């Protein structure tokens, strides 16, 4: 049987990229599988057979490495969290929120800071220093002045990547500049967003010549963190890890309690003040939501 990757699901059909022939076949799912709760989504690895008319039948789905609910996609290697240094302004609170969501989903993260020519590389690096310090990979790009595009291409090579980040930061432009035949629309709010939250999102994996696969979607559309338990939030800030268990109270939330190792680390600049402030804001958000139930 053939094996391949599902690039998109549309109207009951699955477009499967065959690992050997590199062709894409339009497939249906074997009828008897559909009735057993068998589901296939973009990114799934499947086994399929070809029929005489050139279409395919999916017979089996391989085990998923991971999957996201919004966008609906499986077997992702990494998320490229993309922001602009200016236009729109760099929103570090939104960056921290996306980082928490990526940590929850246990995804590898690359932070991509685009439009650096509007500021300077030096300024951009300064602003993101605390993120590099805690272990996140950060790349700096400018589509306009062709800065850092090789770094991005290297990151995407042979990986399955999902782009996340606000609209207007240059996600589509970046992809086009790496591979012009993608012809992604630039400077437009995605049709999917305009249609509203409740319509189905079609997520498509695009093929890069360097062996990478990318999904150019708004990514992580659910930005509400209140589904997390307040006690869990600390585990999704990697820089807190070294201090957990050192507070006076074992149930310390690192907000108001005395003798808190996290707060001491913030004072001694072992933890970035801005990140800690966002931790407190998210914590409050989670607790407020709980109270209103
Ligand atoms: N100054 C500047 N503008 C950029 C750069 N990259 C993209 N843009 C512009 O930013 C706007 C939004 O780009 P787009 O790729 O559609 O962003 P997306 O919504 O994240 O996909 C467009 O007008 C682009 O021309 C860059 O590096 N520098
Ligand atoms: Mg776009
Ligand atoms: Zn504490």
Image (cartoon, rainbow, N blue to C red):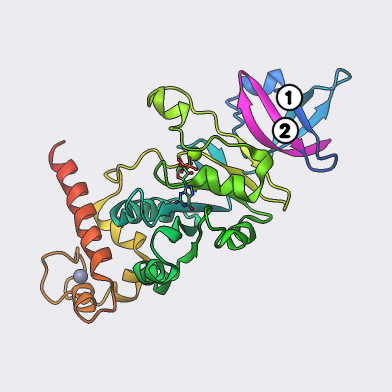
User: Mark 2 highlights which residue?
Assistant: 16
Q: Is residue 276 above or below residue 229?
A: below
Q: Residue visible at 45% across and 60% down?
A: 117
Residue 15 shown left or right of residue 291 in the figure: right
Q: Which residues are magenta?
A: 1-17
Residue found at x 55% / y 33% = 203
Ranked by sequence position, the earlier of labels 1 and 2 is 2
For residue 220, side relative to residue 30 (left or right):
left
Viewer-side residue, 12 vs 218? 218
User: Is residue 16 visible to the viewer in this orientation of the structure?
Assistant: yes
Judged left or right of residue 147, residue 257 is left
Residue positioned most to the right: 52
Distance CA(mark 1)–CA(mark 2):
7 Å
Q: Nearer the viewer, residue 200 or 283?
A: 200
Marks 1 and 2 close (CB-CB < 8 Å): yes
Q: Could you say where residue 206 lies in the image, as x and y percent from the top left?
A: 65, 40
Residue 9 point in image, percent of width and height? 62, 27
Q: What is the secondary structure assignment of the residue under circle 1?
A: strand
- State how many labels appear: 2
List the residue tagged with mark 1: 27
């Amino acid at each position: 049987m053939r094996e391949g990757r599902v690039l998109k699901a549309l109207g009951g059909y699955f477009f499967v990229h065959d690992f050997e022939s590199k062709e894409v076949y339009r497939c249906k799912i074997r009828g008897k599988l559909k009735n057993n709760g068998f589901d296939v989504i973009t990114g799934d690895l499947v086994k399929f057979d070809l029929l005489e008319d050139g279409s395919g039948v999916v017979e089996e789905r391989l085990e998923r490495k991971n999957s996201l609910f919004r966008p609906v996609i499986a077997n992702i290697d990494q998320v490229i969290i993309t922001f602009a240094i200016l236009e729109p302004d760099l929103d570090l609170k939104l960056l921290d929120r996306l980082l928490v969501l990526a940590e929850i989903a246990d995804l590898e993260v690359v932070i991509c800071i685009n439009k650096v020519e509007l500021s300077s590389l030096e300024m951009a690096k300064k602003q993101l220093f605390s993120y590099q310090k805690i272990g996140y990979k950060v790349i700096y790009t400018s589509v306009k002045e062709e800065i850092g595009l090789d770094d991005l291409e290297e990151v995407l090579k042979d990986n399955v990547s999902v782009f996340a980040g606000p609209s207007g930061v240059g996600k589509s432009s970046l992809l086009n500049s790496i591979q012009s035949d993608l012809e992604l629309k630039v400077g437009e709010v995605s049709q999917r967003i305009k249609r509203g939250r409740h319509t189905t999102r079609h997520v498509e994996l695009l093929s890069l010549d360097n062996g990478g696969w990318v999904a150019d979607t708004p990514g992580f559309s659910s930005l509400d963190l209140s589904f997390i338990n307040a006690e869990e939030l600390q585990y999704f800030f990697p820089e807190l890890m070294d201090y957990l268990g050192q507070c006076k109270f074992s149930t310390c939330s690192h907000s108001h309690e005395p003798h808190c190792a996290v707060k001491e680390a913030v004072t001694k600049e072992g933890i970035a003040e801005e990140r800690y402030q966002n931790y407190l804001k998210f914590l409050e958000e989670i607790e407020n939501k709980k109270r209103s139930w």
